[in-house]
Amino acid sequence: MRKILFAVLVLIVIGIGILHFTTPGYMIFYHDMYRRLSYFPIVLGAIWFGVWGGLLLAVMSSIAFIPHVLIYIGEGSGTYLSELTEIILYLAAGTVTGIIAGRESLLRQRYKDLSEKLEISYDKLHRETQLMLEVEEQLGAAQKLSALGQLSASLAHEIKNPLSSIKGTAEILLDEFPYDHPKREFVEILLKETTRLNNTVEEVLQFSRRGVQGEKKEDAQTEPLSGVIDRVTSLLASQLRKKNLTLTVSGWEAGKTFFVAGEKLSQVFLNLILNAIDAVPKRGTISLHIKKLDNALRVTVADNGPGVPAEEREKIFTPFFSSKDGGTGLGLSISRKIIESYGGEITFSECEDGGSCFTVSLPDRTLKGDIIGEAPAAMSVDREV
C-alpha cells in the first residue's frame, strides 16, 4: 500500500512537470497554480514517508520545475532568481514537514510504549489485587479455624464424657450377646463407631491446639476395603430405606485384597455416601464401584442427583463451605485431608446423567501393616443395598 501511495505521488509530480512544459510562458496564472500544486505531493510524501520521502519528492518536483525555469533565463536576473527560489522552498518544505512528521511518529510510538507499560502495570495490579483477595479469604478461613479450635476446647469435655458412657454401655451389651447372636454384629458396630468418633474428636482437638494439620498417623490395624464398605453401608441402611434409595456396590473382589486404615477410610466413605443420600431425590440411585489398578485402587461414588453447580465446584473441598442448610462444610475437607495424608487423591467430576461423582484413588505403598482378618464371607462380587 505504501508503494502504491508513493507511486501516485510520483505520477502527480510528473503530471505537474508536463503541465509546466506544455503550457505557454505568457500564461502566468496557470504556471503559478502549477507551482503551488507541487507543494501537495511534497508535503504528503513527508507526512507519510518521513524526511527522506519529502526530500525525494521535493527533488523530483524541482527537476520537473527546471524546464519552466529555463524559460526565464533571458528575462533578467530578478525573474530568474525568483523562479529558482521556488526550488529551494520545495526542498525546505519537504525537510521541515518530514522532521515534524518524524517527531509526531516518535511521540506516537512513545505513547504506544507507555500504553503497553500501563497495560502491563494494570495486569500486575490486577493479579496482586486478586492475590490480596485470596489472602483475605485464607485469613477469614484461618479465623474460622481459630474459632473452631476455641469451640472444640470448650466442648471437648462435654463430648468425651457421653462417648465414654456410650462405649462402656456398648461393652456391657457386647458381653450379653453370644458370638452367634444376630444382634451382636450391631453392638460391635456401635462399639467401633464410638471408638472412631472418640478418635475423631481427639484429632479435632489436636488440630485446634497446633493450628496446623498434624503428621500422618497410621492406624494400629488395617483391614480389607470391602470390610470397610460393608460396615459403612450397614450403618447407612436405615437412612437409605427412609428415602427408598438404591445403593449398588460393585467390585467386591478388588477390595478384598486391598488393605486400608479402616477407621480413617470409614469416615471418608461415610461422608461421601451421606452427601449422596442428601443430594438424590426419593427412589434415587447411588453407585459405588471398586476397581484395582496397577499400583493403586480407585473407588467411585456416583449418584443421579442434581449435581453441583459449576460456580461451586472449585469450593466444595474448601473448609466451612456448604450448600446444605445447617451443613458445617467440613466433611469433604476432612475427607480430602485424610486421603492426601495417605498419598492418595480425591476428585470431583460430573456424572453422565448429571449427578455428582467422587473418585478416591489410593496407592498401595501407603497402606502398611499386618493383614488383619479376612473380608466377610457373605460378600459377593456385586451387591445391592
Image (spheres, rainbow, N blue to C red):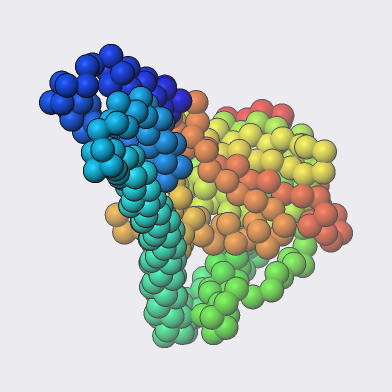
On screen, residue 273 versus residue 221, left or right, reads: left
Q: Quadrant of the C terminus?
A: top right
Q: Quadrant of the N terminus?
A: top left
Residue closest to the eye, 96 or 186: 96
Residue 378, x across and y down, in percent: 71, 36
Position of residue 77 relative to residue 189, above or below, is: above
At 21% from the left edge and 33% from the top edge, which residue is drawn?
A: 36
At 34% from the left edge and 45% from the top edge, which residue is drawn?
A: 88
On screen, residue 58 versus residue 294, left or right, reads: left
Can residue 206 be seen here? The reply is yes
Position of residue 306 relative to residue 177, above or below, is: above
At 43% from the left edge and 67% from the top edge, which residue is drawn?
A: 128
Q: For residue 229, what is the image quadrant? A: top right
Residue 111, x across and y down, in percent: 36, 56
Residue 54, x across and y down, in percent: 39, 40
Residue 28, x across and y down, in percent: 15, 26
Residue at the extreme right: 370
Can residue 108 be seen here? The reply is no
Q: For residue 77, what is the image quadrant? A: top left
Residue closest to the eye, 118 or 310: 118
